[in-house]
Image (cartoon, rainbow, N blue to C red):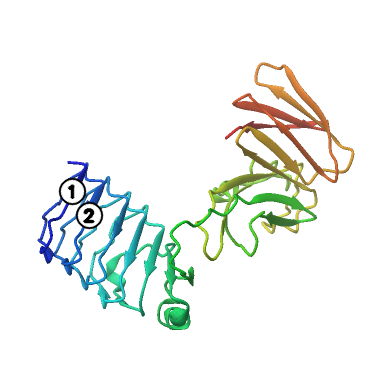
Amino acid sequence: MESIVIPPHVTSIGGECFSNCSRLSKIELPSTVTSFESRCFMNCVSLIEMELPSSFTKFGYGCFMGCTNLRSITVPASVGSISEMCFKDCDGLKTIHFLGNVPDILSTSYLNKNVVLYVPAEYLQEFKEKLGNRYSRIFVWKGDNDHPQCAMPTISYSDGDLHFCCSTPDVKILYSISSADFATKALAKDGKVHLVAAYDISAYATADMHYDSDVAHASIYWLNANFNSTVDIKETENRGIMVMSQGGILSISGLDDGETVKLFAIDGRLIDNITANRGVVSCNVSEPLVIVKIGEQSMKISMK
């Protein structure tokens, strides 16, 4: 069963009614439905979105629990609360469109803290006051379902600073940095640590009336870094090189102007010989794995 149309005059979807219907991807509800009872759509892993009638008032306990591919849901103004366990394990939920004032969203509803909440302009401040401590991405909802997606941001590095750029206007860039090298305790006898991929960086763009961008990934490679017991990115004696590979395009920043970068295939073939312009080189790469040589140092890059 991939889709179902609920007949007119039905007022409630009973407890566990469609529980574990793993192929159910679409359900059409009549205007008479006012409530979902407990676990009615639990583990409906093919369900992607849900449009509720304006008469709807009640989410039952755990009604969408385990709907891992549910991406979007619109909540009518008539809904007063979102119940316990309602969105537990709904890992794919990206947006909720609220058509009315702030419902009571229980902390035990397990609503993903990264979800985007679209709300009416007249209630924006109330949503932020009541929910802003738990959900930081609250934007005005104007009732238009056809939102564009933010462009994927680019990540570059120069003079000790990370730089993010996105062609979509008025975006916010959310980023994370992980450091695998510093996760392990080690002893450096000469005070020098030759690092490989010291920092892995991911970032995405978000903007009002836009869907989030795809996630961009990049890495900083330190060249002959001498840390002298510091882990501050700005206190390294030597420079960092930012490498970003996306869609077959390799971009390297943090270089000196005029510096030469050589690219080799894993079998030793020279792929390209590029000169940096304003500290950046960029080229198309068809190989899944390349060796980048900068001066006397080289690094192995996996293309994504």
Question: Going 80% across and 52% down the picture, which residue do you hit?
Answer: 237
Quadrant including the N terminus = top left
Q: Say few, some or many: other residues with alpha carbon within 10 Å of mark 1 (under 14 / 14 to 19 / 20 or more).
A: few
Is residue 81 placed above or below 51 in the rendered structure?
below
Looking at the rendered structure, the secondary structure element under dot 2 is strand
Residue carrying label 2:
28
Q: Relative to residue 218, is residue 19 drawn left or right?
A: left
Q: Where 207 sits versus 250, above or below?
A: below
Residue 209 picture location, percent across and down: 52, 63
Residue 124 on image: x %, y %? 46, 79
Mark 1 or mark 2: whose residue is earlier in sequence: 1
Q: Relative to residue 199, is residue 54 depicted above or below? A: below
Q: Position of residue 53 (x, y in %)?
A: 25, 66
> Of the residues shown, which amino acid type is indicated by label 2?
Glu
Residue receiving disc 1:
4
Taking the image as shown, residue 68 lies to the left or right of residue 113, namely left
Vertical relation: 299 (above or below) 132: above
